[in-house]
Image (tube, helix red, strand yellow):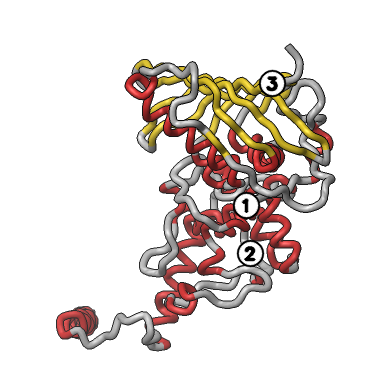
């Protein structure tokens, strides 16, 4: 028995020496354009699969068939994943061509395991280019992406594009890196909009109407340098918060849903014309596309602005004229807006919005 143990120890020692020599001499090529040997590849694949299986075994899978969940996942997938894992109707990208191991084309993967997929998205995989999205994304948003991936293989290119347009774009609870990808900016209303009742910037008659043909032309967003009646000390008391408000208005007017969403706190409370939306996610999946369409159709002129900041909280109140044509009807309204903002590690975030308006032709 002792002889066998000595022999075993000798074999192990020899393997260690060989591995040490391989590492020390740099003989093994780690370049991404030179594939692993079959032995190394199979060893890594087996270790990866077993590691994921063991750690995902106790993951509880929620309901994944909710259309809204799938739609939210579409926006984030398009912004965060499609560059490597591709999308229906799209060819390979510069990134996907250069990665090794080659990332799977997820539109062709029909048998995903939800628990394992969730674990991989959340924790990533070392030395593969697959990041740990848990660094910027909370679990509910990861499950949205899992729900979308279950649906993805059955989507045509047109269905994929429509789902992305109807989504809230790149939105997952904070830490989003903005993109100018217009497809993820989502300009169209989802089907559920009609069930929510009329949503209007004008309390009298001007509802957000998605039935008119095509996208409205983008109108000029014209905030004068110093509007009459503006608090002259505003830049000193709440300058950074005001800059966030201006960026928010500009993003709404340009139709950049991803940028709008990034400036909203996850628990933002939005009130308008009797309607209430109680989170960024709810707003992004319901009235945001209509609000952007409205702002693109009209000319916004800031008339008065005031505000203040106390510690990590600030408020900014704005009065503006909104004029233009919507759904073939001329409109001229006076809009009042109050925003409450909270200072975070990522800058000022909007935690509350209240919009109200009246017909400018009436006293």
Q: Residue at x 28, y 85 (%)?
A: 29
Q: Nearer the viewer, mark 1 or mark 3?
A: 3
Left or right of 207: which side holds 91? Answer: left
For the residue pair 91 and 30, the one nearer the viewer reads as: 91
Residue 116 placement: quadrant: bottom right
As drawn, the label of residue 73 is: 1
Q: Vertical placement of 126 versus 214: above or below?
A: below
Q: Which residue is mark 2?
A: 112
Q: Residue at x 70, y 67 (%)?
A: 153
Question: In the rendered structure, which disc, 2 or 1, sits on the residue that comes first in sequence?
Answer: 1
Q: Residue at x 23, y 80 (%)?
A: 12
Question: In the rendered structure, which disc, 1 or 3, sits on the residue that comes first in sequence?
Answer: 1
Q: Which residue is mark 3?
A: 357
On the image, the x and y values in percent for residue 91 come to 60, 77
Asked if one can make out residue 113 in the rendered structure from this viewpoint, the answer is: yes
Tell me whether the residue at label 1 lies in contact with that at label 3, contact meaning CB atoms closer than 8 angstroms: no
On the image, the x and y values in percent for residue 151 come to 71, 60
Query: Which corner quadrant holds the N terminus?
Result: bottom left
Q: Residue at x 51, y 61 (%)?
A: 53
Left or right of 104: which side holds 343? Answer: left
């Amino acid at each position: 028995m002792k002889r066998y143990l000595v022999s075993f120890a000798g074999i192990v020692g020899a393997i260690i020496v060989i591995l040490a020599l391989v590492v020390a001499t740099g003989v093994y090529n780690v370049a991404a354009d030179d594939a692993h040997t079959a032995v190394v590849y199979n060893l890594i694949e087996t270790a990866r699969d077993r590691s994921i299986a063991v750690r995902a075994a106790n993951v509880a899978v929620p309901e994944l068939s909710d259309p809204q969940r799938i739609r939210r996942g579409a926006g984030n997938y398009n912004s965060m994943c499609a560059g490597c894992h591709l999308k229906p109707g799209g060819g390979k990208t510069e990134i996907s061509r250069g990665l090794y191991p080659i990332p799977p084309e997820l539109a062709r993967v029909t048998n995903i395991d939800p628990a394992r997929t969730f674990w991989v998205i959340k924790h990533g995989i070392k030395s593969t280019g697959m990041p740990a999205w848990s660094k910027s994304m909370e679990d509910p948003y990861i499950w949205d992406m899992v729900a979308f991936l279950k649906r993805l293989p059955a989507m045509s290119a047109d269905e994929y594009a429509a789902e992305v347009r109807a989504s809230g774009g790149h939105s997952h609870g904070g830490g989003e890196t903005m993109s100018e990808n217009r497809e993820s900016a989502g300009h169209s209303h989802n089907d559920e909009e009609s069930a929510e009742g009329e949503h209007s910037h004008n309390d009298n008659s001007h509802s957000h109407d998605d039935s008119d043909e095509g996208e409205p032309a983008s109108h000029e967003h014209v905030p004068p340098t110093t509007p009459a009646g503006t608090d002259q000390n505003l830049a000193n008391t709440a300058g950074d918060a005001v800059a966030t408000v201006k960026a928010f208005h500009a993003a709404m007017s340009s139709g950049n849903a991803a940028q709008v969403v990034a400036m909203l706190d996850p628990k933002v409370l939005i009130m308008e014309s009797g309607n209430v939306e109680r989170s960024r996610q709810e707003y992004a999946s319901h009235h945001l596309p209509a609000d952007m369409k409205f702002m693109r159709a009209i000319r916004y002129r800031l008339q008065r602005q005031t505000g203040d900041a106390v510690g990590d909280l600030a408020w900014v109140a704005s009065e503006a004229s909104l004029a233009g044509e919507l759904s073939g009807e001329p409109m001229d309204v006076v809009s009042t807006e109050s925003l409450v903002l909270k200072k975070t590690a990522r800058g000022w975030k909007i935690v509350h919005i209240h919009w109200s308006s009246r017909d400018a032709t009436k006293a």
